[in-house]
Image (cartoon, rainbow, N blue to C red):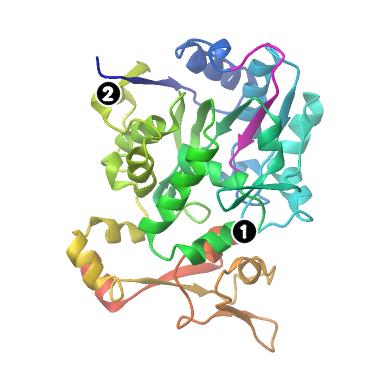
Amino acid sequence: MTAKSRVSIVRCANYKQPEVEGAVKTAVELLGGIEKFVKPDSRVLIKPNLLSARMPEDGVDTHPEVVRAVARLVKAITPHVLVGDSPGGWGINDIDEVYEKSGMKRVCLEENIKLVKFDKAVMLEGFPFASVIGEVDAIISIPKLKSHVATILTGAVKNMFGTVVGLHKAQCHLRAPSPEKLADILAHVYSLVKPALSIMDGIVGMEGEGPAAGSLRNFGIILAGGDGVSLDAVFATLAGIDPCKVPTTYEAQKRGCGIADLNRIEIAGERLKDVKIAHFKLPKTSILFNLSKPIFNAGVKAVKFSPHILKKECNRCGLCFKICPKNAVKKIDTGEYVVNTKECIRCFCCYEVCPDKAITLKKSLLAKVIMR
């Protein structure tokens, strides 16, 4: 008999505490209950998606009420609950600001949960992972439902990239200048630190130019699954995308990390057709993934998007300068930052971490023609 996985879908219209707690509990119960994923008295790390120091209403990070709901569910089984993440572009000295603004610090204080910093690393197959990964019995991942300029969508697979400490994530982009190679690294990381359970915050998500500069939209759903690859496949299907067109999902399935075939995924709770997302806006860069492989390989240098810093919107925080793996972001005499497009490898790290939407993606002439 062919193995199957299960993904639950539960409606949740807003971030009011009772509604979120009820939706998360129902989503997990549809999978067999929290006891299926967490053992009594075990140590559990809850890993939200914290991209940057943004307020919950900005829709960039996992909402704190979803983290609270998951934490309460876990605390019914074990008191040993930790919360932590390592956002790209933010060093260990800056993480307090991320925890403060995102609401993680407040929730952890209110729920008496330990908020940990990924300040120590252990090497595993060439990656410096947060040492806490080896100190817990299970990880629960809470990704945010968003589009992504580098990987089309970002979900359960990509969320585990945050277990790689600090600015090393930017160096991974240097090692993987193409979306396909980056997806392979992301899938490799996921394979090494697979979470026991993934619960996606899709109440308010982001479409368009995600993961930070897109448009917010109320999708009103919570997704959950023991197989993060299956969860991402269901997300893609809801957004009207072939799951294997999403490079992280494709590479993770190829590595044997999970199931992306909808015929082998059992849906519990809401039916796919009843919660399907109408007209989900993809990032402009998604046209690159729609090209056939021969055309993509031949035209990738001509069909391109280059980051450009908007002077009036830039607050000179320097995050783009700090995270650029190629040192293509320069600080000029006026104190302003500019991108040297000749050195840029178009990993979009600067675009991803900019807190003020001060970086736009300029299309090449051929990209403009194709998009017409």
Identified at 50% across, 31% down, the residue is 200
Span of residues in magenta: 38-50
Quick check: is 45 in the magenta stretch? yes
Toward the viewer: 343 or 164?
164
Label 2 secondary element: helix
As shown in the figure, which amino acid type bears the numbered disc 1?
Answer: His
Q: Position of residue 76 (x, y in %)?
A: 68, 11
The image's mark for residue 264 is 2
Q: Earlier in the sequence, mark 2 or mark 1?
A: 1
Q: Quadrant of the N terminus?
A: top left
Quarter of the image where one finds residue 30: top left
Find disc 1 in the rendering and name its residue: 168
Q: Please indicate, yes or no, whether residue 348 appears anywhere in the rendered image.
A: no
Q: Position of residue 91 (x, y in %)?
A: 72, 57
Quarter of the image where one finds residue 111: top right
Q: Position of residue 272 (x, y in %)?
A: 30, 24
Label 1 secondary element: helix
Toward the viewer: 6 or 339?
6
As shown in the figure, which amino acid type bears the numbered disc 2?
Answer: Arg
**For the view shown, which residue lies furthest in the front direction?**
125
Q: Quadrant of the C terminus?
A: bottom left
Residue 242 located left or right of residue 135: left
Q: Check the image and report above or below for 281 versus 104.
A: below
Quarter of the image where one finds residue 253: top left
Residue 52 located left or right of residue 41: left
Toward the viewer: 70 or 196?
196
Q: Main secondary structure of the magenta part?
A: loop
Q: Please indicate, yes or no, whether residue 332 appears anywhere in the rendered image.
A: yes
